[in-house]
Amino acid sequence: MKMRLLWLFGSLALALVLAVITLQSPRPAPADTPATAFSAARAMADVREIARRPHPVGSPEHARVQAYLLRRMEALGLQTSTQTGPLSPGAVRRLTREGAAPDAASRGAVNLIGVLPGRDPALPAVALMAHYDTAADSPGAADDSAGVAAVLEAVRAIQTRGPADRTLVVLLTDAEELGLDGARAFWGDHPLRDRIGAVVNLEARGGGGRAMMFETGRGNAETIDLFARIARRTTGGVSSNSLAVFVYELMPNGTDFTIPKERGVQGINLAFIGRPAQYHSPTSTPEALDVGSVQHIGSQTLETADALLRGPTLPRAGEDRVYADLFGRVVVGHPPVFGWVLLATAFAALALTLWRARARAGLSAADVGRGMIDGLWFLTTGVVVAAAVRSLAGRAVADGDYYTLLARLPWMEAGVALAVLAVALLLLAGRARFDRGVVASAVASAAALALLLSGVSPILIGAAVVAIGLSLAPGLAARTPWGGWTGLIGLVLIVAAAAQAAAPVAAFLFVWMGLFAALAALIAAFADPGLTRARSLAAPAIALVLAGGWIMSLSHTVFLGIGMDLPGVLALLGLLVLMFARPFNPERGSARPLLIAALVVLAVGAGLSAGARVAEPMSDPFEARA
């Protein structure tokens, strides 16, 4: 095995290890944890009681859970009350379809409200919110019994820490699963509505994984500053970034947090989405729930709520913040306009690298352009192959059974990730070394398969046309490692500039990674322009491990969120990883082993995705078992 291949696969392996470590849910705190801290073991006592059986609106089990929760809230010293609001016509029709009791609709949505008065009732209050109803066929241990139990445990810990100046409102909403009717009732006309200045909402779309903060109020700079401060105090750190907030804002989905957000209330929305087969499923039981997920969402809830209750002021709406967590341990961010400063720095570093590589390694402008074209070939081919492999698992969400596809999601993710890796290996092997007709035919066949199994997609058709055209022009492939590397960095920086202009809060992924890659290239150019010695490969290797691990961890969460509809998103994220792997172009004699590896990886990926149709739900390899 040649030196560059050893560097490449060793660095990728370390990056994967780093990603897996980052994605682990924390160890659950035992029941004898100090009273001021959050304990998942204590919270699980409530989960087991709440999630004995499904408890949809209007069912006898729903009434049992309602009575239990009122007793628990009273035992915590909260001033309890209920609020009954009407169900929407859509909710009534759904109850009828699900075979609910004839009088279920007339009972309405019953919110459970608890108040822990603060020392200064004139200050705006803080609300902890979760819903206690479930889907008709699911015990709902995760969605949302875990959220309700986490709220109760957080309240207990807050009281143990001593009185706070602000009032705490506990809002356990009803009929969330029927269309957010309980939240609409409270935020529509409840007397406490206008006293609340910040909300922490808890949700779930699955049964495990790290809890992510995926939504905030609009103009979130002060909210993010507070969230960053509590990161080091939470069990397992935090998971959040402004790209997730931006993407969720564009999606049609809604949670109870949607209602106060539309009223201009600041706050955060937390959820875990791993083990997706449990979402709205009979398998969502306390025994199947990842207790580490309860610990993670509960710890973030406690520390955020406590900081809000005891802070001199609550976050106010202002500008949005560009931010992201780094491996779940620290949150870094900056104002949107600062992205232009980072971009200018990245372009300057790239220009200096180009000057050095041209003077010492004979790099030409034409080869830099060919490197950009290589990146475009990878992206378009990756989108096509990802769509083809994804289609093997079942039709698109719009046409298929959503919950069946959710159960297949880990298989899809593994299959699509391997497919994108296969395309990257082909590029690293040197796409110009393979028969142009064979490569173009393979891309065309993948596009035809995806269109046949998943339906017509203009994006897929466009990507296929570009990929086939570039496959037929192997002369446009980069001819030197420097050409391939700097061209790819340049392509990413162009994408970063476009993203910075169109959506600055979402551009950080390209801006930060483009800057990191440009600096790594600059160091390598001055260490050894020939890219033949270990000292010149050390900086790219370190960058590949750190950036690759970070991007892989983000990719997992992104695919769980939107991968069923947009599997090609892994090709876009793969482009960023490839940017760091590009300097490890193997020597010519290593092309054949890479080609064989690519074909094997692609076959395994396709097999995993196709196998999802007949296999049991896969345990997510990224997430720890409770």
Image (tube, rainbow, N blue to C red):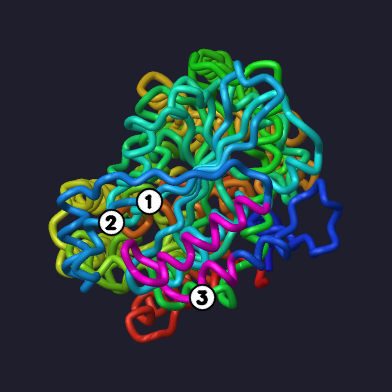
Q: Position of residue 247 (x, y in %)?
A: 39, 38
Q: Secondary structure at mark 1?
A: strand
Q: Secondary structure at mark 2?
A: helix
Which of the numbered marks, if any, corresponds to residue 556? none
Looking at the picture, which amino acid does disc 1 mark?
Val
Residue sitting nearer the eye, 410 or 465: 410
- Side (left or right) of 303 relative to 439: right
Mark 2 → mark 3, Cα distance in angstroms? 22 Å
The answer to whether residue 4 shows anywhere in this view is no
Mark 3 → mark 1, Cα distance in angstroms? 20 Å
Q: Is residue 287 above or below residue 36?
A: below
Residue sitting nearer the eye, 615 or 48: 48
* Residue 199 is a magenta residue: no
| Image quadrant in which you'd find residue 128 | top right
Residue sitting nearer the eye, 223 or 485: 223
Residue bearing mark 2: 107
Residue at x 39%, y 40% (from the top left corner): 248
Q: Secondary structure at mark 3?
A: loop
Q: Position of residue 528 (x, y in %)?
A: 74, 36
Query: Which span is picked out in magenta?
Result: 47-75
What kind of secondary structure does the magenta stretch mostly adopt?
helix
Residue at x 42%, y 43% (from the top left corner): 375
Looking at the picture, which amino acid does disc 3 mark?
Arg
Which of the numbered marks, if any, corresponds to residue 52? 3
